[in-house]
Amino acid sequence: MTSLNAVVVSIRLAIAFGMQRIMYEFIGAEGLYKVGQLRSLEQLLTSVTSMGVFNGVVKYLAEFKEDKPQLQKLFSSAFVFSVFGTTVAALGLFFGASYLSEYLFATTEFTYLLKFIAVLTPAIALQRIFDGVVNGLSQYKQYAKIQFVSYIISTILTLTCLYFYNLDGALVAIALAPVIQLGMIFVVFFKVLKEYIQFKELSFKTPMAKSLLAFTLMSFVSSILLPFVEIDLRSMIAERISETDAGVWTNVTVLSKNYMVFSGSIFTLYVLPKFASIHTGNEFKKEVFSIYKTLLPIFGLGMLVVYLLRNVLIELLYPGLTEMAPLFKWQLMGDFIRLGSLVLAHQFLAKKMVRNYIFSEIISIALFFGLSYYFVTDYGVEGIVIAHFIRYALYFLLVIFLLWRYFNNRRNKRLNAQKTD
């Protein structure tokens, strides 16, 4: 799975780099700042429209593969959640389009775009839920095919619209990406979807509401608060420094998100289902070390190459934006620690450790937000990536402590039970 993922992500990275260069030539750093705002909004909508049930679908589908009645309860609940989330998101976007355009892009020119996205919200919700099915079944070959072909089609559409309609065309094409991915899921995975989801038997009931609400709460913290923070920080940089600097930070985060895609699919396709089936501290440690031995050397080497070639990458992708160079070391170090901490933190999702997950995520996001505002005063845009590094260094230590306490409490309960017997 890691080998297949490495090939797919390597090709995707090459395409993404070419795409970034072309977009930079057409719309500049200021335009890329607006693209970054839209992508953060779509990330937020992905969670809101599906009410954050993605990880719940992954977890329970992995557990109830052979239990068809339980699966019907799961998907009936998931679709009711998505109907509610989609309705709220669509109405909020459509009627608040003018205000949101001003908030995101510092202009009302993109009101039409937000109303257009409001119409697309049902597709965004369905894409997220069906994505959870693919991940819950650990169908990594099909997942790789869906992701890769969707990305190619989205890239071609974005370049075409960019050429003919400039920034507006690129933004509309990016907004259509979830619809394209939903279409690919139907093409590649429809037979399997029909096997596990009895569409005709779905009811407007929520028998698993309580179970899924835990994942909704967890998703709210990580998938909704973080995009809000990113949007606010971009706006703050644009206001206090310049839109160009906001674009510089956006460019660094785009590169980061592209290579972090490699880990994201492994987390949902392998790590989450695997941790869900592990019940002892020793098994957990063994699996974590196995994942670390596989992933960390690959990531470490890749990040070292990116750092050494940073000036070449800047010249290839963003000619003239030399102020990006100092940002690489902090972003890469932060991402490396982030990878190690996210492996551990998936235990919170696997075991539905809601309080630990929410507590650690709120601390992490609050650190990033507060430190960014503090450091940007003295270090400019570099202060944001310094905050990113410190945030994940502290988050890693916090997750280790919370997991140590969790397994220690479990062991003590077992020992007390044995003494009682």
Image: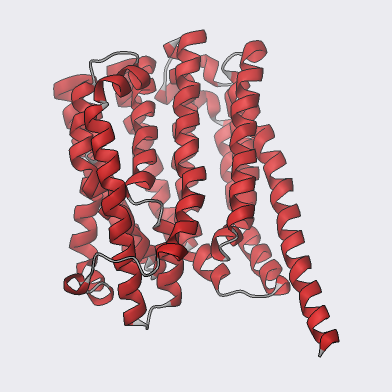
Residue 223 location in percent, x, y?
46, 43
Q: Is the C terminus in the top left, top right, bottom left or bottom right quadrant? A: bottom right
Regarding residue 169, the answer to whether it shows in the image is no
* Residue at 58 percent of width and 36 percent of height: 365
* Depth order, front residue of 355/395: 355
As drawn, is 84 to the left or to the right of 237? Answer: left
Q: Which of 258 and 395 is in front in this view?
A: 395
Give the tally of numbered discs.
0
Up/down of 380 relative to 266, above or below = above
Q: In this view, does 360 lie above or below 62?
A: above
Q: Which residue lies furthest to the bottom in this view?
A: 421
Residue 283 shown left or right of residue 419 in the figure: left
Viewer-closest of 220 and 157: 220
Where's residue 355, x and y in %?
A: 62, 54
Q: Which residue corresponds to the image point at 45% horizontal and 47% vertical from the top-left?
A: 261
Q: Position of residue 321 (x, y in %)?
A: 47, 15
Q: Where is residue 171 in the image (x, y as percent from the top left)?
A: 25, 28
The residue that appears at 45% across and 57% down in the rendered structure is: 213
Residue 134 to residue 314: above or below: below
